[in-house]
Image: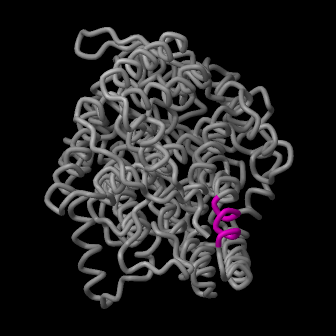
Amino acid sequence: MRFFRLLPSSLPALPWWARAADALTLTILLVSPIVAATGGFRVIVYGLLVSVRSVDRLILCALVISAIRHWAVRSPTLLQRVRAFPERVPEDADDRAPLAPDEHALFADRRSFWRAALEFAGLSIGFGLLVVVMTWPQAARLDMVPDLGDPLFSTWRLAWTAHQIVRDPLHLFDGNIFYPERLTLTYSDSHVALGLLSAPFIWAGIHQLVVYNALFLSLISLSGVTMFLLVRALTGRADAALVSGVLFTLYPYRFEHYSHLELQATFWIPLLLLAIHRAFKRGRLRDGLAAGLLMGLQTLSSLYYGVFLTAFLVPICVVLWLHSRVARPAVRGLAAGVVVAAAMVAPVAAAYAANRSMVGERPFGVIEAYSAQGSDYLVPHWRAARYGTIGAEHRPECELFPTITPVALTLAGAWPPLSAARIGYVSALALAFDASLGSNGRVYRLLYEYAPGFRALRVPSRFSVLVGMTLTLLAGYGVARVTRARGSAARWTMALLAAGAGIFEMTPRNNLVPAWMEPPATVASLPNDPGVVLVELPMPLDELTIWEDARSNYNSTFHWQKVANGASGHVPESYLQLFARLQTFPSDDAMEYLCERGVTHVAVHQKFYVHDRYARVVRELAARTDIALVATGSFLGAESRLYRLAH
């Protein structure tokens, strides 16, 4: 069965300007619902004010353009052209075969393993170079990060996994921060799979910050590679796949979350979708098992995305199931894959369940604060060089402007007639968009109430990553459709122009700051004793800057002693007490509290103190008899001191 398949008809040719007028009319009509949903937009592009806010004016404009076009050229009409728009079917496709027209290449690949591996390596190099150029100078400065918060925290997560997995894997989730709390790795996304991927490089002696940056850039480039493979399999067109790969690689969401390592881990998703397509077309058990394996790896790379995918995949799988001629064996294979994914995720889920008192449900009020609005899809992030404004005030994690290129190509790709695959993806796109609205939509409210895992998530707007992924996938269909009647040279020229337009629009600003590659000199004086508990000072200035304590996480990767402070997605009550009681350090009250907490050593770093506070703290410590100076050294061009408590 072909979905919405319309037979081509022979229509008279139109002059180029009439075709352009028809395209403009359709574009305006398609944009009108978006303007109605979002309230329109107002941006300045190279000094030119572009404002689109009135749906009535848009429709009037479309009617005027259409009227002039039909007055000059009456036949064929725009409606006749739309109804006769044909879906291209490959010459070798058989209508009786179970493959849909845009999935004919799913099983056409008969290359050897080594040839496929060579192609994958070539694609990785190509997309890797694209990422290097677009994020320059990060590849040349692997000691630099976007900020000294989440990147340092993620570096600690990677290094802790590599450290603990070979020493005491049964206590992997008992991180060394927030002493004496347990299961502190579960206070945020543990991204165990990423830790295991990076572990061999850390074991080989590569600096943990270099490993973090290399992995970060690799996750972005591999996402482009796997999107290329998926779109080429679905369309049979390498030129269309190239455009989708480039757009997915540089999609603006990545630069909005440039400090979040796990949110760049999207390269498993296209492979998962490819495995699902194969399962519904062949009904093979191994395809279902592969889908389960990939779902498990995606969940262990980013818990957010794993939970989101449980909802996102539903419309895709339902449509493919209705269209499949091997539905029963496909469902059996995918059911086996669900078992595989559950088995992979179970140990991690058990750790989070054991710490439910800390990482349990998020109040719906928190969900509301991080719920997008329709108009947020017209708000660019400040890192978007073509659209964003440095210093612009917007709600956090709600700057979701996808740029024009993927949206325009998606309109072409999602225009009827549609195959089963595209119906599934258009449905999933609508679901992801509504879910990203969180409390402002309907889908996320239902998921929060009835679907497991969603109550533990804080930021519904991150669903927009699946909006972006689907847009870039459908953009590949759009390229294939727009260029279907062209020769090879013309196809590649148009594809390169589309990719170039995407690169131009999505060019980011990449502001980086240096991080330290060596620990404070005083760390070498810490005794190699499991009873050591360290506090690093100063504490953050207020609760809004608690994330700054990620420097304690990062510093601990050089010594792996227990530390009482730290930073994570959740903050335990014991840390808040530490934060409050140490505001007067080294007062009698603060020293008494440190003894109660079992702290044995205190590191004091002049670099992070403001004004003359460091000198005052050092003078007051010198006057106390219950704490002794162990070592003095340098750290970031300033003084650092290590003290031992006498108790």
Q: Residue at x 66, y 67 (%)?
A: 171
Vertical relation: 608 (above or below) 233? above
Q: Where is residue 429 in the image (x, y as percent from the top left)?
A: 58, 46
**Residue stretch rendered in magenta on the structure:** 316-323
Using the rendered view, name the quadrant where residue 345 is placed.
bottom right
Q: Which residue is drawn at 61% across and 87% down?
A: 284
Q: Position of residue 196 (x, y in %)?
A: 49, 69
Q: Where is residue 279 in the image (x, y as percent from the top left)?
A: 60, 78
Split into 4 quadrants, where in the image is the N terminus?
Answer: bottom right
**Camera sees residue 222:** yes
In the image, residue 293 lies in the stretch drawn in magenta: no
Using the rendered view, name the quadrant where residue 337 is placed.
bottom right
Q: Which residue is drawn at 70% across and 53% down?
A: 311
User: How is colour applied across the structure in the image?
Assistant: one colour
Choose between 610 and 111: the one closer to the eye: 111
Choose between 514 and 97: the one closer to the eye: 97
Vertical relation: 357 (above or below) 459? below
**Camera sees residue 174:** no
Choose between 419 and 45: the one closer to the eye: 419
Q: Provide the major secondary structure of the magenta segment.
A: helix
The single residue placed furthest to the right in the displayed view is 450
Q: In this view, does 356 lie to the left or right of 545?
A: right
Q: Is residue 37 left or right of residue 538?
A: right
The single residue placed furthest to the left in the displayed view is 489
